[in-house]
Amino acid sequence: MIRRPPRSTLFPYTTLSDLLGSDRFFRVNSPLPISFFVCESVGKMIFRALRAVRTVQPVPRAALRVVAPQARCFAHPINTHLMRDNDEISPSSEQPMYRNEFTLKAPSEHKKDVANATKHPVVHDTSELIQSHAGDPHQYCGLGEWRYAHYDTVREPTFPRKPDISKGELAAGATVTRTDVWHDPKEPAITSVAKFSPENFRPVGFAENAPQVTSTCPEGTLDFRANRLPIGHADRRPWVYFMTAASGVVAAGLIRAIAGKLLLTLWPAKDVFAAGIVEVDLRPIQVGQNFVVKWRSKPVFIRKRTPEMIASCKKDDVIAPSMREPATDAERCKKPEWLICIGVCTHLGCIPQPDAGNYGGYFCPCHGSHYDHAGRIRQGPAPKNLELPPYVFVDDNTVKLG
């Protein structure tokens, strides 16, 4: 069986396109001419063709552990495209690009470790800062781009290698869900799985080396921390009371504005109010005349009654209790000489004719309703007397409807 040789650290590229798209091409670290790149690329493609026809047996993924040297650093993967299968680069569970030593504890225990750990001395010059075990985590990529990287986007196999928790190896993602690393027969499964939540893992040395930043303001910059009172301090109460009162005033103003807008929206328009109040000059109306005015889109009869009409209506007051809608002449007319009523029949809304009918007042020819000179129903199907509008006499010669 012919085995595929591992990728060389001197020339770790499969094709010319890999070289042109790599960081090293832009760095021009390799002095080899382009002709060598082309020949090597053609050789690689021939090798793949032979393997496709099973002349060469593929090498298991686990055996391909020699990869291009990568710096151990953090933040996001080197390859920014989607996860994919790769026969040359091992997945993160087999070839991590970070220091695979982690401590598995509850978050409360990690917090205690940070509080009790021995910190590095405080320095005032950046040159005195300790050096990272992986060197500078920034990697130069392409043309003028710097980035972090701590794993390749290579898809994990269906059954990845089980992490060794006793050695501090990280168990996350596929290495937890596709292995039994979480299984502990001494406790329920839900408790065992909960231990592998990401907040339970901290890198070894995190408590001693992780920076605990207290401020982003350099010395000499006033950030008002010393001027702030702790929560619950007695001197904070006036400010709390002031803010509560101010918030209440603002809230009350908003509620008032909303309620006012709602009322104004539902309130009738000014033209509606204007149409609801009509003043009528009574001087042009002759004795015995039935004057018609328009009020709220309805006809209003204003009749200046003669003495005979008044006497006839008062004479019938004795039989008013027996009428369909009992009412005396004085109850119908505020002033004896003036009858003011809405000229709409109370049966089906027709307009009665004046000076007609069996009682000489009003007559509705549609269904034969008879009204007297006080607008009282005397005969016919109408159920009620002619309706009286709200009115008031402004003076002897003016009446206001509405």
Image (cartoon, rainbow, N blue to C red):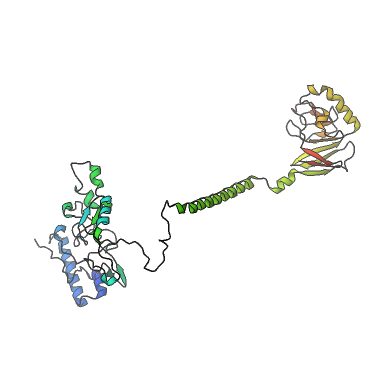
Residue 290 x %, y %: 85, 37
Do we see residue 400 in this rendering? yes
Q: Residue at x 16, y 52 (%)?
A: 166
Q: Number of marks in the image? A: 0
Q: Residue at x 84, y 22 (%)?
A: 318
Residue 295, above or below 68: above
Q: Residue furthest left?
A: 1
Report whether 91 appears left or right of 225.
Answer: left
Of the pair 36 and 55, the residue shown nearer to us: 36
Of the pair 267 and 380, the residue shown nearer to us: 267
Report whether 169 appears left or right of 257.
Answer: left
Residue 340, above or below 169: above
Image quadrant occupied by the N terminus? bottom left
Residue 175 x %, y %: 21, 52
Image quadrant occupied by the C terminus? top right
Do we see residue 162 in this rendering? no
> Where, by quadrant of the figure, is residue 64 drawn?
bottom left
Residue 191 x %, y %: 24, 43
Q: Residue at x 42, y 56 (%)?
A: 229
Residue 248 x %, y %: 54, 49
> Where, by quadrant of the figure, is residue 358 drawn?
top right
Report whether 326 appears left or right of 232.
Answer: right
Residue 209, above or below 388: below
Of the pair 347 and 334, the residue shown nearer to us: 334
